[in-house]
Amino acid sequence: MKFVPYGKLSKKKKRELNRARRGGWGGMSPVTRRGENPKAYKRKKIRLSDLSGELDLFSRRLQNKVLLIGQ
């Protein structure tokens, strides 16, 4: 094969060369990882499913008040 300067290669050949030169991350994710900020507000900490028992208690109290007022 004859040597051809990179600038004179076709677009297709340049793509092939570039793909061959590029390496992967080797199974590692390129996303930066940081520890959690202990002072930050955590939205996922309190969930509605965790409060379902308290909501049931609240709704029962509310129903009892409505019944008492209606009598």
Image: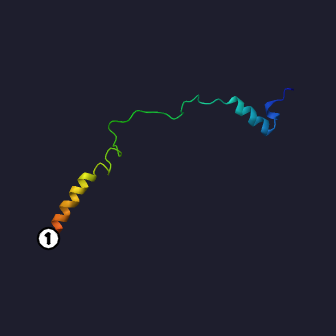
Callout 1: helix, strand or loop? helix
Residue at 24% across / 56% down in the picture? 56
Within 10 Å of the Cα at label 1, are there few (<14), some (14-19), or many (20+) other Cα atoms?
few
Q: Is residue 44 left or right of residue 10?
A: left
Rendered view: 62 above or below 54:
below
Residue at 75% across / 32% down in the picture? 17
Residue at 16% across / 69% down in the picture? 67
- Between 22 and 54, the one lying in front of the other is 54
Residue that badge 1 annotates: 69
Q: Residue 23: horizontal and vertical position, in percent?
A: 65, 29
Residue, far right: 2
Q: Residue 16: horizontal and vertical position, in percent?
A: 75, 34
Q: Is residue 37 left or right of residue 71?
A: right
| Quadrant hosting residue 30 | top right
Rendered view: 22 above or below 63:
above
User: Identity of the amino acid at label 1?
Assistant: Ile
Q: Residue 11: horizontal and vertical position, in percent?
A: 78, 39
Q: Is residue 5 left or right of residue 60?
A: right
Rendered view: 67 above or below 49:
below
| Quadrant hosting residue 18 | top right
Looking at the rendered image, the quarter that the N terminus falls into is top right
- Between 20 and 67, the one lying in front of the other is 67
- Between 20 and 66, the one lying in front of the other is 66
